[in-house]
Amino acid sequence: MCSGRIDLKFIIKAFASCQDGVFIGACRLNECNYVTHGNYDAFGNVLLFKRIMEHIGLIPERLHIEFMSAADGNILADSVNLFVKRIKELGPLGKSDRIDADELNLKLKAVQRLVPYLKLVERERFRIPVKSKAAYEQFYTSDEFESLFQELIVEKLALSQIMLLLEEKPLSTGELAGILGLNPSEISGYMGDSSRQGLVRYDENKKCYALA
């Protein structure tokens, strides 16, 4: 199977099912059997998801991609062994990342809900024309990427978590801020936008937000 078929939803599903690490094997870059160069798509997805992992508090090294040919059995074996060793050193997902189980579950569910949006953003805003490992690494560590990440993804992740919390019960601004580790002004901003879109409503009597 082409590594370009490795969808973001596969990666998040693995972590959501409590896998401690995800290893992706791909063809050598610039040696793709298809004109699509799907291994670059896989590489871009990995780099994007590593940044998402960092944002939600997971150690990015839990996700790894290795490029090799079908004849590189020794590279595969060595890479897998090294990855397994590293994951054992990191320890169990969540616990070693110092994230409470409920908090981790909320964050991973929030990311799962955003997969269609993340795929669109990756395709429309994060694809770069130059097919080289250096170019991809440079872009995904650049100020440009970080600015786009903050603009296009951070708020969506926060809103996704808020919607999940409000599905369980109405919550006040202070309660949402405490759960998500945000300040009340940030929550108020998110709620203002969501209210205008008809997604949430504010209960004046109970002084809390609920789904509309």
Image (spheres, grey):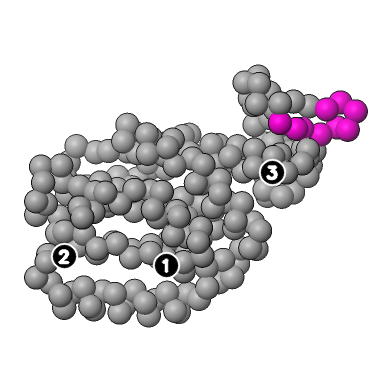
What stretch of residues is rendered in magenta?
A: 203-211
Q: Residue, x 29% and y 62% (percent of image)?
A: 24
Percent position of residue 50, x then y: 40, 55
Cα gap from disc 2 to disc 3, whole angstroms: 43 Å
In this picture, is 160 found above or below 8? above
- Residue lying farthest to the front in this orientation: 1
Q: Secondary structure at mark 2?
A: loop
Residue that mark 1 sits on: 21
Query: Which quadrant holds the N terminus?
Result: bottom left
Q: Dot 2, crowdedness within 10 Å: few (<14), some or many (≥20)?
A: some
Residue identified by numbered label 3: 165
Q: Earlier in the sequence, mark 2 or mark 1?
A: 1
| Marks 2 and 3 close (CB-CB < 8 Å) | no
Which residue is nearer to you in this view: 44 or 77?
Answer: 77
Q: Secondary structure at mark 1?
A: loop
Mark 2 highlights which residue?
68
> Where does the image place residue 176, in percent across and percent down from the top left?
73, 43
Q: Which amino acid, mark 2?
A: Met
Question: Quick check: can you spot residue 176?
Answer: no
Position in image of residue 104 (x %, y %): 59, 58
Residue at horizontal 77%, vertical 41%?
169
